[in-house]
Amino acid sequence: MSKRCRTAILISGSGTNLQAFIDAIADGEIDLEIVVVFSNNPDAYGLQRAAAAGIPTACIRHDAFADRESFDAAVIAELDGFAPDLLVLAGFMRILGPAFVAHYRGKILNIHPALLPLYPGLNTHQRVIDAGDEWHGSTVHFVTEQLDAGPRILQGRLRVNADENANELQDRVQSLEHKIFPRAANMVGNGDVTFIDGQCWVNGAPREEPEIETF
Ligand code: GRF
């Protein structure tokens, strides 16, 4: 029997994506083991979700550190105590520096609420509405030193409704995130998807374009 992928989930807020992982594991849909939920924010509601599920939690406040490098080093020291195979950034609102990314190269996943490479950065839902786009969605990708630009693994997309506001659109995008993020992380956890020389490989072959699931 193969060992389950030891997964650390990093959050800053509500943790609805974290909850989706907890539920997918409980339902036997994915085969990851969440070994720790980490937050930079002691008030993150996701920490309560983790505790309720019996998952260890850890918290280091970023504002207690003079610079990004010393915060990142403290997070590495904390996480390495849990020997993670995979780091899942699920609404983790801190940019991780190059030393952190290098330490866990190819093992960090992020979800970004846009169809990357469209709309890196913040406020994506309003920007999509303002542009009058037909499609919007979310992207699971490997984290590299370039913000929101690492190799893409899986995208979930939906059609933007006429007259939909940014909050409504965000709700629908978050619902699809809860399906694609655990699934994508599981594909990495079971070895079907890997990060080799800066590229996403699927079942032993490099893949430029992500898999796209339409909702
Ligand atoms: C998600 O929408 C994700 O795309 C973004 O942050 C949000 C986190 O939401 N990176 P939650 O904390 O999982 O509810």
Image: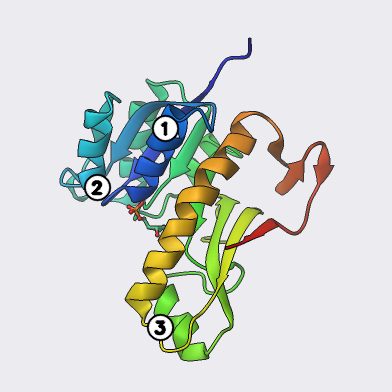
Residue at 34% over, 36% down: 75
Q: Nearer the viewer, mark 1 or mark 2?
A: 1
Up/down of 15 relative to 116, above or below: above
Q: Along the polypeptide, which appears first: circle 1 or circle 2?
A: 1
Q: Which mark, residue 62?
A: 2
Mark 1 Cα-neighbour bin, 10 Å: few <14, some 14–19, many ≥20: many
For disc 1, the marked residue is 8
**Residue 112: x percent and y percent?**
49, 60
**Coloring scheme used:** rainbow
Residue at 56% over, 59% down: 139
Secondary-structure class at tag 2:
helix
Alpha carbon separation for disc pair 3 and 1: 35 Å
Q: Is there any visible trace of residue 144 in the rendered image?
A: no
Q: Is there any visible trace of residue 135 in the rendered image?
A: yes
Q: Name the quadrant of the C terminus.
A: bottom right
Secondary-structure class at tag 1:
strand
Alpha carbon separation for disc pair 2 and 3: 36 Å
Q: Residue furthest top?
A: 1
Q: Name the quadrant of the N terminus.
A: top right
| Residue type, mark 3 in image | Glu
**Residue 19: x percent and y percent?**
35, 41
